Amino acid sequence: MELPTALLMFIAQRHAEERIVEHLRAHGFADLTLAQGRIAARIAEEGSRITDLAEQAQVTKQTAGFLVEQLERAGYVDRVPDPTDKRARLVRIAPRGREAQECAREMEQTVEAEWAAHLGPRRMGQLRDALVSLREITDPFL
Amino acid sequence: MELPTALLMFIAQRHAEERIVEHLRAHGFADLTLAQGRIAARIAEEGSRITDLAEQAQVTKQTAGFLVEQLERAGYVDRVPDPTDKRARLVRIAPRGREAQECAREMEQTVEAEWAAHLGPRRMGQLRDALVSLREITDPFL
DNA sequence: CTATTTAGTCAGACACTCTGACTATACGTG
DNA sequence: CACGTATAGTCAGAGTGTCTGACTAAATAG
């Protein structure tokens, strides 16, 4: 075996991540770091709680809170009291955040398309199939 | 498409990474961080230069130097003058580093085996085949 | 021999992440 | 209902990883 499978995944995954960050940067979203993006990408349409974001992004709630604060200051999200729980505040995507989401998704799809073109539809399908299956034994959030 | 392919890779890859760190920790290599490990894993048998390690691990040479310094202090590597270039110093794996490498490789193979068992040999082969092919368009170091 | 490149370090700064301690609210049980 | 526990979140402090910029010393090209 030349390289471990996990390292192969790391290589491709980081490439995608960098392309997205670069694309955002080129479109005026130069503040917005990777860590912030990982949080922002997980905010639900109805708004999300810090604790849920933390769990999904696999960081502590302190870290999630810190990142949300940056996002809020930069205008990517806003926070409203949760009507159903006075302890909680809901984090929602703000207009600027939505623009950034769309920008990121754009490059995400571009990269995905490049991969599909390189591998061909059959092997791309096999790749996704294997990865989805692997998730069953590797996703701590599942 | 439920989840982007790159995110699926991230999930599996992080799982492998965490298993390895946890295994190292359980075997007395509790100092030794992920970042240090990423550098250490790339040290060649004959020794490597900081600059090469930096390039392979995709960090600046300052960062690589910083991490090597930690590794050296903890006894995982040592550094000797490069006989062919008086500017350079070769980073070499020390005995303790070799033990850690073996420990890490052990879990790496365990995880690899778990994946193969879950997917079956055919799909595991397809997965690796696709990832190796993808490397052609995603590995900045290739 | 000089100019440029390369290997590496030093200094400073910032981002990310964690642990521990704390407040306030919600919830479950007797 | 009251009390104890669990949950949502914050504050404070620390450590680690990472970068940019400026620098030194040695190698190399012309």
Image: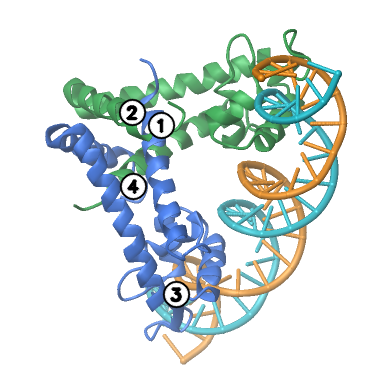
Chain colours: A blue, B green, C cyan, D orange
Q: Are marks 3 and 2 in contact (CB under 8 Å)?
A: no
Where in the figure is residue B60, as x and y percent of width and height? Answer: 62, 37
Kind of residue at badge 3? Val
**Callout 4 secondary element:** helix
Of mark 1 and mark 4, the one earlier in the sequence is: 4
- Tags 3 and 4 on a common chain: no
**The label number, if any, that marks residue B136 in the structure image:** 2
Front-most of B25 and A132? A132
Q: From the image, tell me which residue sits under label 1.
A: B139
Q: Chain of mark 3?
A: A
Q: Residue A8's quadrant in the figure? A: top left
Residue at x 46%, y 19% (from the top left corner): B106
For marks 1 and 3, give the CA distance.
34 Å
For marks 3 and 2, give the CA distance.
37 Å
Q: From the image, tell me which residue sits under label 3.
A: A77
**The label number, if any, that marks residue A98 in the structure image:** none
Where in the figure is residue B108, as x and y percent of width and height? Answer: 43, 24
**Callout 3 secondary element:** strand
For marks 1 and 4, give the CA distance.
17 Å
User: Among all residues in the image, which is located at the extreme left?
Assistant: A122
Q: Is residue B16 above or below residue C26?
A: above
Q: Chain of mark 1?
A: B
**Callout 1 secondary element:** loop
Residue at x 35%, y 24% (from the top left corner): B112
Kind of residue at badge 4? Leu
Q: Residue C15's quadrant in the figure? A: bottom right
Residue at x 25%, y 29% (from the top left corner): B130
Front-most of B95 and B80? B80
